[in-house]
Image (cartoon, rainbow, N blue to C red):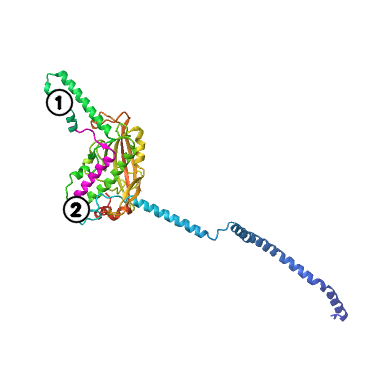
Amino acid sequence: MDVPKFNDIVQKLSVLKSCSSLVWPVVIALAAILLFVPIQLFSGKLKGQIAAESISLGKRVSSLKTNAVPRDQWQVEQQYQQAYESDANQMALLARRTTERELLSYKIFPETKDTSTFIFTEFGRQFRRKIDELITSVNGRDCPSVTELQKSVQGSLTSRSTFGRGAGTFSQKSTDIDAAIREALCRAKAESASVYVNPYNLSGYQFWEKFEYTGMAEAVGSCWYYQLAYWIIEDVFDTIRVTNSGSNSVFTSPVKRLLNVSFTQAPAAGSARGKADNRPSYVLTPYSGLVEPWTTRVCTDDMDVVHFDVTVVVSTRAVFRFMEQLCSAKQHKFRGWTGEDQEQTFKHNQITILESDIGSFDQNAKVHNLYRYGDDAVVELDLICEYILNKKGYDEIKPQSIKEEFKQPAK
């Protein structure tokens, strides 16, 4: 084996030494090549992330800066919320006040401490007296009574009896005179009244005329329901008064006659519906009222619902005007549930028409025999309506016996 010579080794080392200046650049180049690919990949990902997050966030910040909410915006929002709350409270207050109405008696509700039956008799007298006042307020009268007709033809009857049966010609003449006298009396009644009204056709009028005490609970219940009836009847008369405004004769009045106000299903229009004890009742289910209501409204924790029926003889040109006025807002007075507070004026609008029927009119029918309606084309308008009462408005005076009705299972 040949041993390397010392000179050869030195020569090789000299070659390596002369090339050592190229080693590091080569190493650096290789490292750069190895790092280039991941750096490019990472750079692309970083750019995307910066564009998606930082730049987008910057744009949103810039946008918010240009549309920045004023420093005191919370105060504006607070005022808005307070106004909204105030509006809601005001609506609730107005709803409650619709049922804060004057009472016919302040001695009975919610519970009377007076054991005398006189308070119920007095309630009935007040009910009838207020109905009479409503009739007067619309210049209402009825057709001539039998007594009035008899008096008007008394002279003619005397003449016939004087001449005897043999005076056929004169008897016929007397009959014609009687008919003329009767017609003149009927027309005079129509000319002196703005609307025909018979109080006995209004629910409760005859009931209280013949009221008999049968027990405290029953008497309180009658007073309560006829108090509701009076409020409703009062609104009907207010409707007639406004509709007939400016007229002092049935001949010129749009509403010619109030046939009835009833709270039960009753016979044909024109019969004396008010003679029966047909006091109002609360509608607890969709099937317990006069009709199934298209409004679907029944008594709830917030409101009470009552149905009623009103029928009028009205000019054909005023049918829709009467219906619109019936459902319009009306004013009422309130002096607290004691009747001694300062008087306030509130508004109520509680009537919705559920069903209407416009019937043909036969002026020769018995029910219209002594009535004269003028030259207008007229119809019988029958309306079944619902009446809404806000519970919070009057629950504090509602008798406990009435409240118990709502605890009974629906029939």
Q: Position of residue 341 (x, y in %)?
A: 30, 54
Q: Position of residue 326 (x, y in %)?
A: 34, 41
Query: Quick check: is 315 in the magenta stretch?
Result: no
Numbered badge on residue 216? 2
Q: Which residue is located at x 45 percent, y 55 percent? A: 83
Highlighted magenta segment, given as a residue range: 119-146
Is any part of residue 192 visible from this angle? yes
Quadrant assignment for the N terminus: bottom right
Real-space Cα separation, disc 1 to disc 2, in angstroms = 53 Å
Which kind of residue does numbered mark 2 sit on? Answer: Met
Q: Which residue is mark 1?
A: 157
Which kind of residue does numbered mark 1 sit on? Answer: Leu
Mark 1 and mark 2 lie on one chain; the one further toward the N terminus is 1
Q: Quadrant of residue 277?
A: top left
Numbered badge on residue 104? none
**Regarding mark 2 in the picture, which secondary structure is present there?**
helix
**Regarding mark 1 in the picture, which secondary structure is present there?**
helix
Q: Main secondary structure of the magenta part?
A: helix
Say which of 364 and 258 sits in front.
258
Say which of 314 and 179 sits in front.
179
Report the label total: 2
Is 57 displayed left or right of 280 in the figure? right
